[in-house]
Image: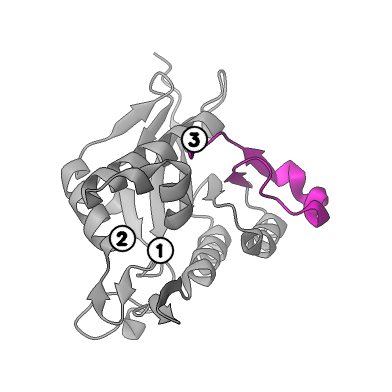
Amino acid sequence: MSTRRFQTAIGFVDWKTALIASGATRRKRLDAAAKTALEHVERVVSDYLGSAGGPRYRVRLRLYAGWHEGKTRTNYFQGIAGIREKVAGRVRTYRDGRVAFLGGDDGIQLGARLACASDRRLAPKHDVHLLATLRRRAGEPTEKMVDTALIADLLGLAMRKEADRYVVVSDDDDMLPGIFAAEAVGAKVGMLRRPGTISRFMTHAEDLVTTYESVEP
């Protein structure tokens, strides 16, 4: 086995997209859906990072979703909470050990607590910066502040040079301005998305985008 040190990577994951792309929405149990989505994310990120002959990586994931409706934890939260508990302290390896995903609170973090915001901005009694990230519009659930939270963390951590690589997992073109900005400050950053989801007006960004096949029917 190579003795070269591991480089570090941070994955910024649009969790709703991960649930859809992994086919997890077909699962009835919340924890089963979260497990399916997490394994899907780890597979596509490790495929992206773990090329033969390239660096070895230790990866931590930051997950962004409507974690709270008002102050109440949503089904998104209930699902991932059980999975985080099960993988706490356990490293998951892929690509013949070339890519290792960290366990516990350091390895799987929820974006409701921003990476670079001041602790004095935490919501009292909740230990997060962002509540009400799932709201109702005409009775339908709508995520709020989720994309901007992901981009704020990407830029904050990139400017701090917290990792060697930054990977955004999302189908949403709204991520691209932040990815451009992270690239401009010197970050090695890329975006993972499903084929056919990038706008035809953004072909000049295709070198930053890697596509993967989902299992969505």
Quadrant where the image shows the N terminus? top left
| Label 2 residue SS | helix
Using the rendered view, name the quadrant where residue 64 is placed.
bottom left
Of 98 and 80, which appears nearest the observer?
A: 80
Q: Residues within 10 Å of mark 1 (few under 14, many from 20)?
A: many
- In the visual, does 133 lie left or right of 171? left
Distance CA(mark 2)–CA(mark 3):
21 Å
Eye-nearest disc, 2 or 3: 2
Q: Are marks 1 and 3 in contact (CB under 8 Å)?
A: no
Sequence-wise, the earlier of marks 2 and 3 is: 3
Distance CA(mark 2)–CA(mark 1):
7 Å
Is residue 209 in the magenta section? Answer: yes
Three-letter code, disc 2: Tyr
Q: Are marks 2 and 1 in contact (CB under 8 Å)?
A: yes
Residue located beneath label 3 in the image: 44
| Label 1 residue SS | loop
Residue 18 on image: x %, y %: 44, 48
Residue located beneath label 1 in the image: 65
Is residue 90 in the magenta section? Answer: no
- In the visual, does 18 lie left or right of 174? left
Residue 37 on image: x %, y %: 37, 44
Q: Is 118 placed above or below 194 here?
A: below
Span highlighted in magenta in the image = 190-217
* Colour scheme of the picture: one colour
Sequence-wise, the earlier of marks 1 and 3 is: 3
Q: Residue furthest top?
A: 1
Residue located beneath label 2 in the image: 76
Three-letter code, disc 3: Val
